[in-house]
Each structure stands twice: as C-alpha cells, then as structure tokens.
Amino acid sequence: MDDSSSVTTSSDKHWLFQSGNSEYRAKKQRIAARLAQLIADHDPTPSQKQILAVVAHHLDDAERARSLVQRVRAGNAARRLLKDIPRKPPPAQLVTARELLDKLRP
C-alpha cells in the first residue's frame, strides 16, 4: 500500500495530519542555518562541532518554545555549552591609508 494514499484528510477534522506539513523540514533547516552560523563564529574542533549541533537545537527551542520555563531552560543550556568552545579571534585592525602614507615619507 502506498503511504501517500494512506494519509487522508477530512474537511471537518482540521487537526489530522496533512501530507503537506513541512514543520519537520523547516525545523531542520532552521537548525542547519544556526549551526552554520555557530561554526562560522567559533573555532570548533570536530568533537565541538557535535556540541554545536546540540547548541543549535537548544537555541531553536529557546526561540520557538511557548513556555517561559522551557525558553529559559533551553537558553541556559546553550549558554553553558557555548562557554567551553573558543570563539574566533576578532580580525586584526587594518592599516589605514594615512598610516601607509606616513610610512612612505622619510
């Protein structure tokens, strides 16, 4: 039996599963985007990349949870995990054009 034909919806039962529901895919995309941002901001080892995936889940839960307790709990868990992963150093101060001209003049 085909799975797509086994999922049926009824107009009087809007709470039933609908085949076009993409919240699962949307959550995975949100977490993947947040993970990419975390990896770009931090300097993780391969094992810390796995921890960053967990942090991305926690941050998504902190953003999307309905309960204040769940939001705070997820945010605190993400913060505790992130404190052990080093951030990338800030970029060095670029030399200005004035400093370059001053070096050329004797």
Image (spheres, helix red, strand yellow):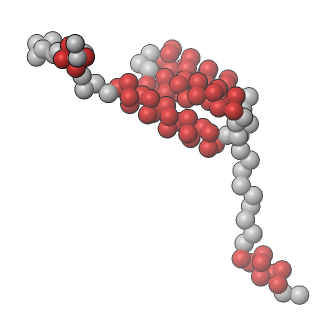
Q: In this view, does 10 lie above or below 20?
A: above
Image x and y of residue 18, in percent: 23, 20
* Residue 82 against residue 74 in the figure, above or below: below
Question: Which residue is situated farthest in the front direction here?
Answer: 1
Q: Is residue 52 left or right of residue 14?
A: right
| Observer-nearest of 1 and 43 | 1
Q: Residue at x 84, y 87 (%)?
A: 105
Left or right: 71 with respect to 21?
Answer: right
Q: At 44% across and 20% down in the image, what residue appears?
A: 65
Q: Which residue corresponds to the image point at 67% horizontal and 24% vertical from the top-left? A: 81
Query: Which residue is pictured at 55% across the width and 23% down the height?
Result: 58
Q: In which quarter of the image is the C terminus?
A: bottom right
Quadrant for residue 53, please give it: top right
Q: Where is residue 67 in the image (x, y as percent from the top left)?
A: 44, 16
Of residue 62 and residue 23, the one placed in the foreground of this image is 23
Residue 77 on image: x %, y % = 62, 20
Q: Is residue 16 visible?
A: no
